[in-house]
Image (cartoon, helix red, strand yellow):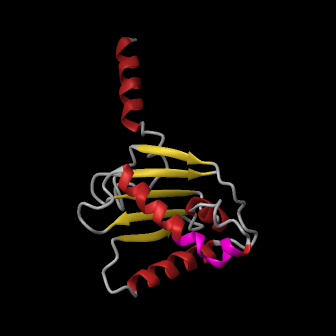
Amino acid sequence: MFRLGFIVIVVCLTFYSSPSAAGDRHAEYYYPTPETEETYKARAQTLEESSRRSRIAFVTGLTNRMLKNAYAPEFAIFAKGEQAEKLIIISVKADTYNTIYRMRALLATLTAVARVTPLFKEGAVQDFFTFFDLCKMLGFQRITVSDGRDFAHRIIIE
C-alpha cells in the first residue's frame, strides 16, 4: 500500500505545474516562466469592435512606429494566442527592464503614450485610463513582460 501511494505522489508531482505556468505555451519560448503575477481590474470596457485583427493591427502599428525611430527599439511587442488575446513585451536590450520596477516604468511610459491617443482624448479619459485600460478596450486578457532572460511578470486584465 505504501508503495502505491508513493508512486501516485511521484506521478502527481511529475505532472504538476505552477498556476502561472499552466496553459502558457509561450513560457520558456519567448520568456522565462513568470514568477510573479498581478490582476488589474480595468476601468474600461472591451470595445464591441475589438477583434483579433484589431489587436494585431495595434501591435503592428506600435512596432512600425518604433522602427521609424532613429534608434533601435528597446523592446519587442507582439500578440499571441488563438485570438491574439495575450500581449507580450520583451526587452531586446541587455540589462534593461530586468526588474519589476523597470518594467513598471516602461508600462507607465506606455500609459503616457496611450493618453495622447484620439481614443482616450475623444472619451475624455486621458487622465484616468492607463495602458492596461487600453489593452482591455482592445480585448487583451493578459500581458506578460520580460527582460528576455531571467525576469518575467504577468498581468491578468479583468
Q: Position of residue 103 (x, y in %)?
A: 39, 57
Q: Residue at x 45, y 63 (%)?
A: 88
Q: Residue furthest top?
A: 1
Q: Position of residue 113 (x, y in %)?
A: 52, 72
- Residue that appears at 24% across and 60% down: 95
Residue 19, can we see it? Answer: yes
The residue furthest right is 48
Residue 80 in view (yes/no)? no
Of residue 93 and residue 82, the one placed in the foreground of this image is 93
Q: Position of residue 141 (x, y in %)?
A: 59, 57
For the record, the magenta segment spans 113-121
Q: Position of residue 151 (x, y in %)?
A: 32, 51
In magenta stretch: residue 115? yes
Front residue of 158/26: it is 158
Q: Is residue 134 left or right of residue 35?
A: right
Residue occupying image coordinates x 39% and y 54%:
27
Q: Which secondary structure dominates the residues rendered in magenta?
A: helix
Q: Is residue 126 above or below residue 25?
A: below
The question of residue 117 being in magenta is answered with: yes
Give the residue furthest to the left. 94
Tell me: 136 left or right of 150: right
Q: How many marks?
A: 0
Split into 4 quadrants, where in the image is the N terminus? top left
